[in-house]
Image (cartoon, helix red, strand yellow):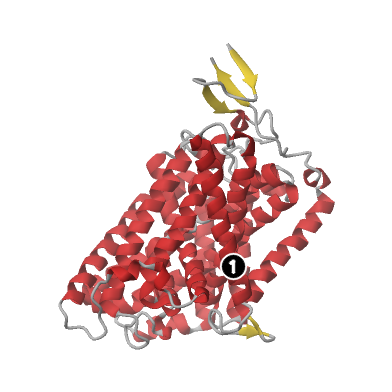
Amino acid sequence: MVQVDPRPQAGDTVTSVAATGSEDGTRGKGLSGDSVGLLGSAVIGISTVAPVYCLTSTLGPTVGEVGVQMPAVFLAGFLPMLLVAFAYRELNKAVPDCGTSFTWTVKAFGPRVGWMCGWGLVIATIIVLSNLAGVATSFFYLLLGELTGSQAIADLDGNRAAHVLTCLAFIAVATAISYRGMTATKGVQYTLVGLQLAVLAVFTVMAMAKAQSGDLAGSLHFSWTWLDPFAVQSFSAFTAGLSLSIFMFWGWDTCLTVNEETTGSAKTPGRAALLAMLVLIGSYLLTAVASQMFSGVGHKGTGLGNPDTADNVFAALATPVMGTVLGVLLFVAVLASAAASLQTTFIPVARTVLAMSTYEALPASFAKIHPRFRSPGRATIAAGVATGVFYAVMSILSENVLIDTIYALGLMICFYYSITAFACAWFFRRELRNSARDLLFNGVFPSLGGLLLAAVFGKTLTDMWNPAYGSGSSVFGVGSVFVIGVGLLLLGVVLMLIMRRRSPAFFRGEVLTGATPALVVEE
């Protein structure tokens, strides 16, 4: 016999009815179910993070903030992300909905907080999409220059018009592939992720081997003190480096965003996210240590602290570490990393917009599913257009748009991850006394992760007012990173007020209820 009971009894098998959409307001979206397994989900998560792209964009700025403590900061950034991943896993078990942070936060804290949390995810994704397109463009021209031996072709990346137009072309192609659904997205990711990790392994081995030869100026011998976060010279430098480190793990939650398309939607996405994060931290630490041993942290030449190469470290290290022939592989890996992630990063933004539209928090037109590809077609196109416009505008406003938007991205990530972590503790507040496991994984770990990210958010918010934060550019005397980050959050408030007038039912809590879902108990 099957009965509905708000509390499971000992020995019962528990299945959330949230997935059926019958009791707590959650709804089916029409996505293609059972399209992704555990490995496929983990690969999509790793691909979205784009490890090679993250490393080439972040190694330099992180060294600029914390020096040789870069590996320690990477570890410090991993800790809150791991704690938040536990929150995502537990929330997904109860409510496997593709709206993830938006849906869960609405159910925990209500429509307004949930809407802003969803906006934080959407705008963070648009920021990273623009950066992915920028890095893909840079390495596209660098790779063409290497292959043709033409410096003129390589220099096209420095031509503003050519760079922006090529970025828009990459965005258009990625949008078209994502529009065709999960099958098209998943099909190429195994090869591209395997290529990235293989090239990173070769780079790491060769960098360490050459550093140990003792023939390189600026190279360093490995020291365990590099893993000590307390050795960072100031708290401001630590939080700035931590913000960058957190950015390097962003994207693992895509594993959860495809939960409605994953086999075993209640458990598989959470396991895939944890698997992806373990692969990421391992590859990051090894590459960081190898790069630091080879190049040191100096401000000239191939030193990781050189501001001239900070936004694209692997472009400077490819040939010195791997030679002329193998060095091309590193260019290929970065281009593949950025291009693959550009494709998969459309997944979280499109599905979050889909969920927000399904629950009447955004215009209904974004809830349309392509009848053949079973993908959120209109939401995907809207994300592509928004990304192209954002990158074009930022390119005009700031010459150092890549660095500044990466710093602003860290703020957005801390914003919506911390809210989601707190939502987990509040959502399960009545279950925390059930067992030690519930207390730790539903309460203590998510709360601690949320507090750590909230602290980074607050400190970063105050530091970024200074124009010296980030690239050093400013708007009317205010740091451009602050203008980008806070301005985008305020834009979200304005859009929320507009939607409140258009969709009063959602904001009254009548569409997506805040109650903890009932549980189906099988005896």
Q: Residue at x 58, y 43 (%)?
A: 98
Quick one: label 1, few (<14), some, or many (20+) residues within 10 Å? many
| Label tally | 1
Q: Image check: 92 left or right of 77?
A: right
Q: Position of residue 430 (x, y in %)?
A: 64, 35
Q: Image check: 56 left or right of 328?
A: right
Q: Quadrant of the N terminus?
A: top right
Q: Position of residue 289 (x, y in %)?
A: 30, 69
Q: Which residue is mark 1?
A: 388
Closer to us: 442 or 292: 442
Question: Which residue is situated farthest in the top direction here?
Answer: 1
Q: Position of residue 397 (x, y in %)?
A: 62, 81
Q: Amino acid at mark 1?
A: Gly
Image quadrant in which you'd find residue 6: top right
Q: Image check: 15 left or right of 500?
A: left
Closer to us: 98 or 279: 279
Q: Is residue 206 above or below residue 218?
A: above
